[in-house]
Image (spheres, rainbow, N blue to C red):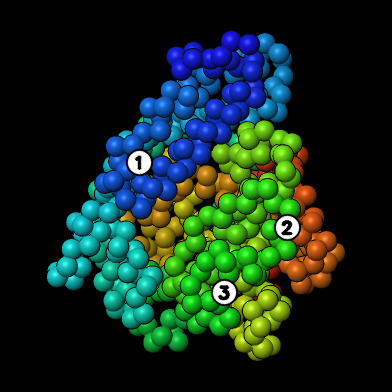
Amino acid sequence: MTERTSGDPPDVHDLFALDRDVERAVRGWRAWRSALRSDPDLHADEDVFLVSAHRRVATKSLFGALGALTKRAGVASLHEEALRRWVAFLLQARLTREADVTIAREMTSREAVLEDVRRVSYREAWRGVVMETARGKSIAWFDAAASRGPSLAALRRERRRLGLDGELVPPALTHQEALASALLDATEDLSGALLREEQKREGVTAPHPVDAIRLAMARDAREGWPARLSARWLHELFHSWFTGASRFELDPLPSALAGASFVRALESFGQSFRRASFEAKSTLPFALRQDPHFVDVYRTGALTASLSASPVFHRRALGLGKDAAVFQARTLGKTLLFALRFSSVRLLLGGAGADGSTWDELTARLFGLPAPRALAFAWPECRDDEGARLVGTLTALPLLRSLVDRHDEDWFSNPRAIEALRTRTLYPAREPPEETLEPSQSSRIASEMGRNFEELFG
């Protein structure tokens, strides 16, 4: 067999060689994105697509060639379809690389002014909002972030223009906006009541968007957690979940700022578990093991995050007493509720038709009053896979109920339940057509999630 040189186009008939190139390009891009977030100036000039093997799988010509192969055959194989989705992802990543660098630099440049005294970056300002224990200080940090909103919004709009604008939208996500709207409707009264209750407890006379953020941080839920979040803690907590893993790469964990940090850590663990390989040799190629819009990764992450709202988990895994476990589960349930509503608003604001009035309406639903227009379309950022995140989270409830019904409320420590979840990692990442969400399903799914939260706080 003749070896391909760096200048040769990829052979669309050699799917496994193409798959290897795609996997290497995706891994290189992910490593670069992570490094860029940590230090934009240091990594801005790095370009993974200068590597010829990476650039070959990030071209419109390859995207078209895979499509033409499908047309000639009359039907696409699962592998061909999966590769085409990844090529579309890499093509968008290549087209938006410079915009991502500019945005990362804008977020870390010290151009925001804090209380007319100190210059801080946009990213530091948001970190100050969530870290500050005094409400007045949180508001000052919030205002500093808002001052940089307009310039960042312009950059985000430019990035959207450069991207593919959803040329390859997964069918399971085609009705995601209806799902987001239904979720906001189903949880409106409950979230408003919880927010007003918290504002009353803090003696708030003039509501502000930071009130909802502070509520979601769950500062009172700190019992049973370690002083520092680490991979070792997760290994000790979920040791049996790692059994048989040939590849289990944990994502970086957040700092232990408040109860919400542990919710994020549990969610991240579930996502890493779903991406893991539990055989010495994987039977599936990369493009089938993973997907650019990996719904089941976010479903599994939502499943493990839901443990934070389980009194049984707090008692048996963290060693809390009955009353403390119930209190902490309810407190962290507010974090889950706010995060879900926040994701819904992210998605709806990211739509092409969003305008100023849409911003006022949606942020008022989230915070109890409209957020400053200076932040419009700069924050919250609608991530490229926001639809997959929302669909995965909202469809985690049936999976959770199935595990509880079959293995009881301490399913997280039951070997049979863990084995059932481990088996799911052998499935292709792509959602089968019968699992797509039709508009008629959105209301039912959202209503079930709303009732689940009402039961938690009832």
Q: Are marks 1 and 3 in contact (CB under 8 Å)?
A: no
Residue 50 visible in the snapshot = yes
Judged from the image, the secondary structure of the residue bearing numbered disc 3 is helix
Q: Name the amino acid, label 2.
A: Thr
Task: Please tell me which residue is depicted at 64% across the width and 15% down the height of the picture.
Answer: 13
**Helix, strand, or loop for circle 1?**
helix
Quadrant housing the C terminus: bottom right
Foreground mark, 1 or 2, reads 2
| Residue holding disc 3 | 332
Which corner quadrant of the image does residue 67 belong to? top right
Q: Is residue 426 above or below residue 272?
A: above
Nearer the observer: mark 3 or 2; the answer is 2
Tell me which numbered mark, 1 or 3, is placed earlier along the sequence: 1
Element marked by disc 2: loop
Which residue position holds label 1? 100
Disc number lying in front (1 or 3): 1
In the rendered view, does 133 fall on the left or right side of 64?
left
| 340 with respect to 31 (left or right) | right
Task: Indicate the amino acid at tag 3.
Answer: Leu
What x and y, as percent, mark residue 378? 34, 51
User: In this view of the protein, which residue sits in the foreground, 181 or 233?
Assistant: 233
Which amino acid does the dot numbered 1 rest on? Answer: Asp
Q: Disc 1 to disc 2, how far (Cα)? A: 38 Å
* Residue 163 visible in the current orientation: no
Percent across and percent down for residue 26 are 51, 36
Image quadrant assignment for residue 76: top right
**Disc with the residue nearer the chain's start (3 vs 2):** 2
> Which residue carries the number 2 mark?
243
